[in-house]
Amino acid sequence: MREVEGVGAVGKTLLRNDVPQGLSLVCLRQDRSLNEAAETADPLRLMRLFGITERTAMHYVGTAHPERTAKLPR
């Protein structure tokens, strides 16, 4: 984990305590990925930003922009 000057590293335990009940860190990450896909529609950026595979990045772009990917072969 990376530390910010004057602030300690944030661990999973700390995050779990602050995440509202009914949400999970996985759901928050998926939501963040989908939001980024809606903003950029750039699968390469998603791959670099979130460390996901090409297939996963294309899934997020396709979900965020169905009109752009409707004619792509499946």
Image: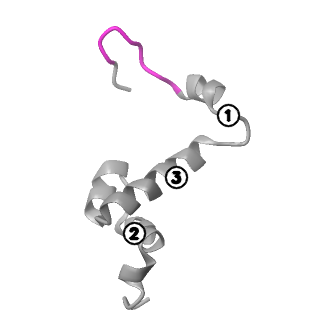
Judging by the rendered image, the residue that carries numbered circle 1 is: 20
Instruction: Identify the amino acid type marked 2.
Output: Val
Q: Which residues are magenta?
A: 4-11
Q: Main secondary structure of the magenta part?
A: loop
Q: Residue furthest right?
A: 22
Quarter occupied by residue 58: bottom left
- The answer for how far apart the CA atoms under marks 3 and 1 are is 15 Å
Closest to the observer, 11 or 66: 66
- Indicate whether 74 appears above or below 46: below
Secondary structure under tag 2 reads helix
Magenta segment includes 10: yes
Magenta segment includes 30: no
Residue 54 location in percent, x, y?
A: 35, 68
Crowd around label 3: few <14 · some 14–19 · many ≥20 (10 Å): few
Q: Is residue 13 left or right of residue 46?
A: right
Residue 48 location in percent, x, y?
A: 28, 53
Judging by the rendered image, the residue that carries numbered circle 3 is: 31
Name the image colouring: one colour
Q: Is residue 25 left or right of residue 20?
A: left
Crowd around label 2: few <14 · some 14–19 · many ≥20 (10 Å): many
Residue 33 location in percent, x, y?
A: 44, 54
Which badge, 2 or 3, comes first in the chain's sequence? Answer: 3
Q: Is residue 42 left or right of residue 12?
A: left
Q: Is residue 61 left or right of residue 29?
A: left
Quarter occupied by residue 69: bottom left
Judging by the rendered image, the residue that carries numbered circle 2 is: 61
